[in-house]
Image: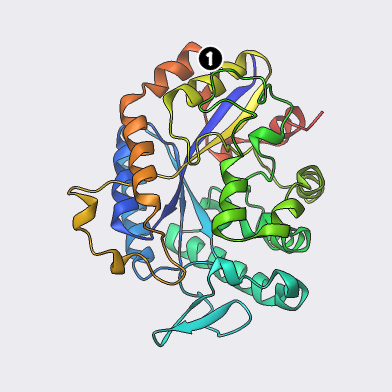
Amino acid sequence: MANKKVILTADDFGAIPFIDKAITAAIKMQNLNCVSAFVCFNDSGKSVKELLQLQLSEAAKGNKFGIGLHFSVTAGEPVTGINNSLTGFYNGQLQFIAPKKYPFKHVTAAINDFKNELKAQIELMGEWLGGIDKIDHVSNHHGVAYVDIDLFEAYIEVISGYNIPIRSPILWSQSHLDYFNAPRLEPPPPWRLNPLTKYGIYKLQWFTEVFESIRFKAKAESAKRKGLILPYCNNDCIYGLPYEKNIVTMIEQYEKAEMVTEFMFHLGYFERDPHDVDIKQINTPNGIDPGYFENRMLEFAMLQELDINKLLSDYAIEKVVFRDLNKNDWEKILIP
């Protein structure tokens, strides 16, 4: 039987109810099977503990999902509680510096602070979930650890000490898949800029750093040498492009090769008109950008309307979590 597997992950759980409600609903619909959760926002502890209870109740119904750490040093508050190269005071509150101000030019000096914060966040999530082995994976908010090669080496050095799977540095558009000749993508390549690259260049203003991030193969091989498990490629066709045809096109590519792939979603849901919401509650100096609202709601609506489980069944694709993967999976998903 072909080794065709997919992980359906939603990011940013534990930041605000707008995100948490959508992710919870998608889990109950069985349209997600993985959650990447913060530990560094005021209500993250309460949110993650409620998510853990949901995990137990859904497992009893045969609906398995994994809970991972969405490591952040660009939004929220430091778990270490220490003011250092990664933090600043906003309205008298210690927070991570905004991503636009991330000290890429002084990465070497900031690496120890970065590693200490990563350890603290992993250990806190392990405490909340009942053990480090219960952490399904580690991903990185804004992908800051994936942009700079030195940061990535520090990132995987820490995580390998805990033996937790990670999100791959390999984007779908950087894989061997037929990405640039996939006519059904909306809008069709090559006429659109990769939305993750566009976000880094225009919104975060990571001009030179974005081009450093293309060293994906070196990063993937480095992670492999440390024994880390990661899926074949991270998904960059949904982010900012919540169209059903993009999901269908990507799933169709499973006919061409054995694949283990993560689809990454950013969901949100308001029970009332988003224009009635007090933006000040969300648009903090380095928090959640209100510009995400519409796109997150569109992604959530897409998942509600799409029968993704039937699609997966039609193509004999198994839903898995990161902890289900093993070395055999990794050997099958190397870049050619």
In the rendered structure, the answer to whether residue 264 lies left or right of residue 206 reads: left
Q: In the rendered image, which residue does mark 1 sit on? A: 316
Q: For the point 81% across and 49% down, which residue is it?
A: 222
Query: Which quadrant is home to the C terminus?
Result: top right
The image shows residue 110 at horizontal and vertical percentages of: 70, 76
Q: Where residue 237 appears, x then y in whole percent?
A: 55, 34
In this picture, residue 38 sits left or right of residue 176: left
The number of numbered discs placed on residues in the rendered structure image is 1
The residue sitting at 65% across, 60% down in the picture is 206
Name the spot of residue 328 as percent of width and height, x first.
Answer: 72, 30
Q: Quadrant of residue 181?
A: top right
Side (left or right) of 308 relative to 17? right
Above or below, 150 relative to 93: above
Q: Nearer the viewer, residue 199 or 117?
A: 199
Q: Nearer the viewer, residue 145 or 30?
A: 145
Left or right: where 156 falls relative to 83 = right
Compared with residue 128, is residue 109 higher up or lower down, i.e. above or below? below
Around disc 1, counting alpha carbons within 10 Å, would you say few (fewer than 14), some (14 to 19), or many (20 or more)? some
